[in-house]
Image (cartoon, rainbow, N blue to C red):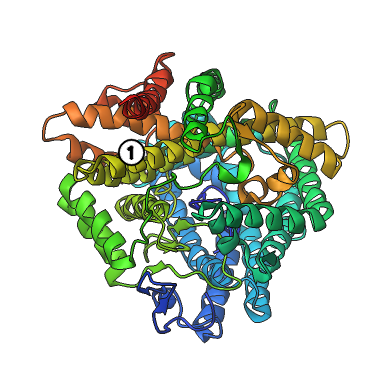
Amino acid sequence: MPRSVVRSSRKSKPLPPPISTKVSRPASRANDVGALPEWNLADLYPSIDSPRIKADLDRAEADSVDFEHEFKGRLAALASGPAAGAALGGAVRRYEAIEDLLGRVISYAGLAYAGNTADPKIAKFYGDVQERVTAISLHLLFFTLELNRIEDNALMAALDDPVFGHYRPWVEDVRKEKPYQLEDRIEQLFHEKSVTGYSAFNRLFDETIAGLRFTVNGKKLAIEPTLNLMQHRDARMRKAAAEALAKTFRENIRLFALVTNTLAKDKEISDRWRGFQDVADARHLSNRVEREVVDALVSAVRASYPKLSHRYYRLKAHWFGKKALPHWDRNAPLPKIDMKTIKWREARDTVLSAYRAFSPRMADIARRFFDEKWIDAPVRPGKAPGAFSHPTVPSVHPYVLLNYQGKPRDVMTLAHELGHGVHQVLAAPNGPLMPPTPLTLAETASVFGEMLTFKRLLAQTRDKTQRKAMLAAKVEDMINTVVRQIAFYTFERKVHTERKNGELTAERIGEIWMEVQHESLGPAIELKPGYETFWSYVPHFIHSPFYVYAYAFGDCLVNSLYAVYEKADEGFADRYLAMLAAGGTKHHSELLRPFGLDATDPGFWQGGLSVIERMIGELEAMEGK
């Protein structure tokens, strides 16, 4: 399931799902985890009916029309005229202000929708705002296209002016898209039809998933609590949940196949028109990472499947007294080890104390999410599944969505999303155009937050049985983050590549899914009938094609980064926070240089993977004793 949502600043388009019309409600209680917070979106707008929303949209439209009237067709002349840097810098500043205003409105609408996708009034509000923002941003579409038509010499000279030079990282990012941009009217058509194209199918997927019900032992459940039962201590409950998921997915599989086929074809059309050679090149460009670097990561992980997932699941099957585990036992709690429910307050204190031990400043920023109601934690009917941290706009602050149910993994998810949140707060001063970090490094901040929390908990654990459970849980998380996400990436590559030759049946998509799952999980996981449908609920395949390798990138990078931290002097935390504060203003190579890390080094990825190997070795050594 998705753990985060990171909005790109490079195009004015609606973000992925992001409460309901009521923004201040009593804290909720889920099972026995204690009072859970619900976010207060009033820092954006007081309600979906607020007149401020219409006023801001009207103002954004008027400003956009004026901006278009003043600058469209004139940027080349400004670049060659006197005071070119000041003139272009002033134009970017006005563009940035409009982006911030539009970002505020669409962020609120998206968060409202994520809080309750089943409410027709909120769904209509979200759809209406999407359409209005798309229409308004059409007046801005010319700007980056015309910037890219300015001659290199003129643009570079203008960047020497401090007003325009402030935006150099953003300009250089825009410039990288130059080879793939199209004629203005085609760009306008692509942009305008997105509302009835991929955005509409994204929404269809979200509302379908949120509305599904899964019958487990006679009780109808939404997807999040059903997936949660896959970690239940009772094997019969895990099996019942898996079968309920498969049954409902199968009943809706033609719809999911239609959505997948349509979006894959939509992407193929866009890629073909823009001139992208590989199915994932557009994602690599948005991530500001070279294809060769990603290919090296994927090759290293796939070569390590036998040493990681195959090896670990063989060990886990042994713990259960079996040669192989059914797929519903893959994330089962270890036998004969009690898995306590972790109350919300304990989860909060655990994460904050781990952050504080690393950096008091980092903990102070994270505490604001709790104190100022920036977190929505309960499971609710209609609420978007999974978890994310959405940065909104620099003039406000991020919001975190969770579905907290008291499992140890939920604590790690909290640490993960707060890592994103801290990153987003630190990067916000760069302004609306330059705070977002490419996904690969954005996931580094979140995974590093998890690692801090895990290491602190492990250091405090003396009981050998509990230590074994913690190590196993961490290994499983790392396998899910590295091995599973690269398998997801492989699945996407196969689906998108094959889709070029015609529509894929649901059965064929299921076959591809089973092929990559068999390869990645190994012989100790038995994929029972029904598992061939489990591709259908993964939101990243719908919202953000090829996003998933960013998790593996981040996890392997964090393993290397943490090794530097353990050997570093006292200045590491300051260097780390400075890296986060840079946001999207620097390339990954520049950000990692102060730590002596280089993602282009062939041995770099193997170093990160070896950390997982050592943890599995420690578990095997415990078994030997």
**Number of marks present in the image shown:** 1
Q: Secondary structure at mark 1?
A: helix
* View extreme (left): residue: 570
| Closer to us: 269 or 622 | 622
Which x, y percent locates residue 3? 49, 51
| Closer to us: 104 or 525 | 525
On screen, residue 217 above or below 421? below
Which x, y percent locates residue 508? 83, 37
On screen, residue 52 above or below 429? below
| Closer to us: 141 or 303 | 303
Q: Quadrant of the C terminus?
A: top left
Indicate the quadrant where residue 205 lies: bottom right
Indicate the quadrant where residue 512 lies: top right
* View extreme (top): residue: 602
Residue under the image location 80 percent in, 45 percent down: 261
Of the residues shown, which amino acid type is indicated by label 1?
Lys
Indicate the quadrant where residue 404 lies: bottom left
On screen, residue 11 above or below 315? below
Is 500 placed left or right of 521 in the picture?
right
Which x, y percent locates residue 267? 73, 41
Residue under the image location 38 percent in, 40 percent down: 474
Asked if residue 580 shows in the view, the reply is no
Residue under the image location 82 percent in, 50 percent down: 258
Residue under the image location 27 percent in, 54 percent down: 351
Which x, y percent locates residue 497? 76, 30
Q: Report the residue marked by disc 1.
A: 468
Asked if residue 527 shows in the view, the reply is yes
